[in-house]
Amino acid sequence: LTQISLINQKYSELLDATGGRFNMFGILGVNHYENTHSAIICELLNPQGSHGLKNQLLKTFVDDLLSRNIQLQEFCETFETETAIAQTEYSTSQGRFDILIEDNCGHAIIIENKIYAEDQQEQLSRYNEFALNKYGAGNYLILYLTLYGTEASEQSCKNIDYSQISHSEFIINWLEECVSLAVRFPLVRETIIQYINHLKELTNQSINDKMSNEISNIILNNDENLKAAFQISKSITEVKNELLKQLMKEIENENRVSNSLKCVKSDLDAINKWKAFSFTSDKLTEYNLDISFSFELSNMRDGTIGLQWRDIEKKSKLIENKLEKYLKQNEAMKSQNCPIYWNYFKSWSEQNFMDIMNKTMTKKFADKFLEINAMALSVIDEIEKDI
């Protein structure tokens, strides 16, 4: 641990000295904006894009698809990247495609890009119906792009063929090839490098390769180090759990929070992905509402904080309607279980746990819980005035 700590310190100082932490995509906060990610990827895939590399980047993309899945050979070999045009937000009678790439021979690649949003009702099935009618069987390819290559929901993709690709592996690998192709285009090259680094942050891969190699060498130096490393990896989930419990207690003890809210639920010991804790007040309880922090994905990824129905069977349409204006104001997103959820604490990473340990996360959480509580009470106040 001491050796690894020294290595970590060395590379941390190197990042400070070289500006390696600087990333414009992170500064602009494009983490969860799917349209922004789609626009970036589409511009690179477009042979007529401003990058000036013509069809080289698209051809590499198609070649990577083929190397990944030999069953796509016929399509990939007949798709003409030289004549292709890529566009975003392509509207059809069956929905809006995030990215559509068409060539002059009637072939198309449709990309549905999901960062955090859920599938719409029969989304890929509807896209497939449109593509089948327009391009014909075998002349189109539907790609389902997510952070980690997860499958589409069953209701979205029932009885259709599609291919899963991920930002964490496929897109990053393709972009790294694009860097080599853009070696004589410095502005394009450096922008792609920054976007790669941003995607690595989003998918918890930001550790420097050289640093990773040094740590691997220490672990492999002898069997005792290897045993210790395995034991640490087995214990890390419990460590994260304990830090979250610590955070929950600190929030509970915050005077500003304890004066208005109380902790009512904790699922931090649950053996599933829905690790969470909730706070409420008498007034919120009266209206069947809690304020919850939870993880949307396994391995404690994608932390979200917002209002949640205490009992989903008793949810109120009146409250949901009243909350509509706050959805837009706070860039929140609706879901089946939660009338209002903030895109907040997304891209949860190791740094967030470090912030808990260093006591810098408590105020952020307390502020957010109080902000959501104030919003909820104002909505309840409006409802009671109407009554």
Image (cartoon, rainbow, N blue to C red):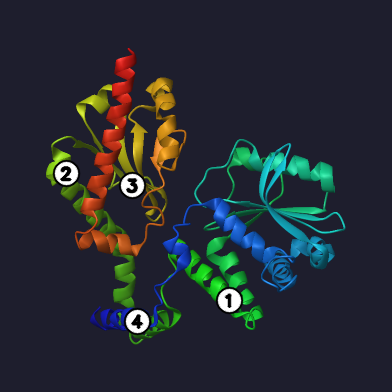
Determine whether the residue tagged by mark 4 lies in a helix, strand or loop. helix
Q: Is residue 266 visible?
A: no
- Tell me the CA gap for discs 1 and 2: 49 Å
Tell me the tag on residue 275: 3
Residue under circle 2? 252
Instruction: Give residue 314's quadrant in the image.
Output: top left
Where does the image place residue 341, in percent across and percent down from the top left? 40, 40
- Tell me the CA gap for discs 1 and 4: 26 Å
Location of residue 71 with respect to 224 vertically, above or below: above
Which sits earlier in the primary sequence, circle 4 or circle 3?
Answer: 4
Tell me the tag on residue 308: none
Q: Is residue 367 visible?
A: yes
**Residue neighbourhood size for the residue with mark 2, other residues' Cα within 10 Å, grouped as few (<14), some (14–19), many (≥20):** some
Which sits earlier in the primary sequence, circle 3 or circle 2?
Answer: 2
Q: Amino acid at mark 4?
A: Tyr
Tag in front: 1 or 2: 1
Determine whether the residue tagged by mark 2 lies in a helix, strand or loop. helix
Residue under circle 1? 187
- Tell me the CA gap for discs 4 and 3: 32 Å
Residue under circle 4? 11
Where does the image place residue 144, in percent across and percent down from the top left? 63, 52
Tag in front: 4 or 3: 4
Residue drawn at x 74%, y 65% is 48
Where does the image place residue 369, in percent across and percent down from the top left? 26, 42
Q: Are the two marked residues, 1 and 3, in contact with CB atoms closer than 8 angstroms? A: no
Tag in front: 1 or 3: 1
Determine whether the residue tagged by mark 1 lies in a helix, strand or loop. helix
**Residue neighbourhood size for the residue with mark 4, other residues' Cα within 10 Å, grouped as few (<14), some (14–19), many (≥20):** some
**Residue neighbourhood size for the residue with mark 3, other residues' Cα within 10 Å, grouped as few (<14), some (14–19), many (≥20):** many
Left or right: 235 in relation to 112: left
